[in-house]
Image (tube, helix red, strand yellow):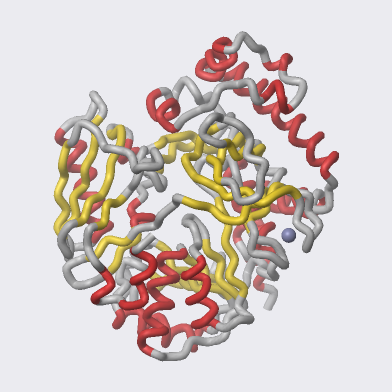
Amino acid sequence: MNSHAAHKDLQNADYVAWVKFLRQSDDWNSEQIRDFELSEIKRITQHAYENTKGYRKVFESVRAKPEDINSIETFRRLPLLTKEMIRDGLEDFSCEYPNREYITTGGSTGIPTGMYRDPGSFAKELASKAHQYHRIGWREGDRQMVFRGLQIETEDCMQFAPEFNELRCSTYQFVPSQMEVYRQKAFEYQPEWIRCYPSSGYVFASYLKDSGEPFPKIKGMLCSSENLYAFQKQLFREVFGDEARIFVNYGHYEMSALAGFCEYTDDYHVLPQYGFVEVLDKDGNLVTKEGEVGEIVATSFIMMATPFIRFKTEDLAVFKGWGCEKCGRPYQIWERIEGRLQELIQTETGRLISTSMLNMHDDSYEYLKQFQFHQRERGKVTFRFVPKENCSENFVDEVQNKLQNKLGNDICLQMEVVKEISLTKRGKHRLLIQELNLKEHHPSLDKSLKI
Ligand SMILES: [Zn+2]
């Protein structure tokens, strides 16, 4: 059976063309990359200047025009774009674009950012991720088991998606008895890969370790949406064996920076065809020393309807250097990502819910400036939020219903209006304040909650 040809993404012309381009440009040298980046920067700034009021103002604030941008240095004189600027002025920073779609995300920081995405951009996003997975042998159509924040209304909480050849398992039911059902099903399905959030993979791997039950041999794990911590990788190796490749990429909904491991190393390789990425220290200077931490500031080459130019992601990277000795790609290399803490909420029956699962990709957060989850007691969680001026009581009810639906009926959700949500010591927004000690019921989770 040729399952590859049937894979849904391979029937999307934009996806196929972008995978082909990435493959052809995979061996570019530094000079070719620099030329490409500069021409993309010129293209995207010209587009943003001509078609959006917001970016025109950004240019005017530094008395510049797109034609003044003739080098990376001149480009870097443009001011930085914050999440708050997009949140408060989305229409100004967006333009009419064919088939654009409105999406929102709470992201990892609790500042809801809405934006417009077009189908071509999304196809490039999927293709770019696939291109990185190809490095470790993944192919479209391979059998994969997916543990993500999906609510699945079947009796066994699983669903097979033939167009992607994947078995989807709901992580809303992450209790040992349900994980045992998934484990047994795996022997029948024989997945080649597991795709998951690191936190959901960790809960499942902890179950396998604590129960001592076996799992079929897999080629690897594809983790995304969250940071992967060393202790998680270690447990995955322990449970799935040294031959299973644990792969992770860094990305975000604004589709401005994408970085993933390579064939040989567990360092983040920043993909230059996807966006222009700067790591900046707190004074706005480029981080150039190995081991130094800076904020990821990114300019998307693929987002057209809402362009992101010098966008402050609020994510932190540990800079390693330029070029990977093992694979030879002259890319920007990061040792790891910091400060993207995935978090877990515990329900009354002991289920663990990752906050990554609570993102709502519709207009749910349109009336909220900021929010944060707070858990003090098992089975109870408070959603604290700063409303926008246009926020009505009906809307709050609506958000409450949606969240309650996602959380399930074994946890009590309280809504609390607050004037502001304070930042962490490092000046970051935090999505969950967890005061529970979850160690008691989940011994292997001990370490994950200490960071
Ligand atoms: Zn490499």
Q: In the rendered picture of this protein, how many numbered marks are placed on residues? A: 0
* Residue plotted at (30% across, 32% down): 369
> Residue 323: image x %, image y %?
76, 51
164 in relation to 336, above or below: below
Quadrant in which the N terminus is drawn: bottom right
Q: Position of residue 360 (x, y in %)?
A: 35, 47
Q: Quadrant of ligand 1?
A: bottom right
Residue 214 on image: x %, y %? 46, 90
Q: Is residue 22 left or right of residue 196?
A: right
Q: Quadrant of the C terminus?
A: bottom left
Q: Going 47% across and 40% down the picture, which residue do you hit?
A: 314
Q: Is residue 288 above or below residue 263?
A: above
Q: Residue at x 23, y 39 (%)?
A: 385
- One can see residue 348 in this view: yes
Locate residue 267, reporting x and y percent. Answer: 64, 59
**Whether residue 97 is situated above or below residue 51 in the rendered picture:** below
Q: Note whether residue 13 is visible.
A: no
Q: Nearer the viewer, residue 109 or 20?
A: 109
Residue 395 occupies quadrant: top left
Q: Is residue 178 above or below residue 17?
A: below
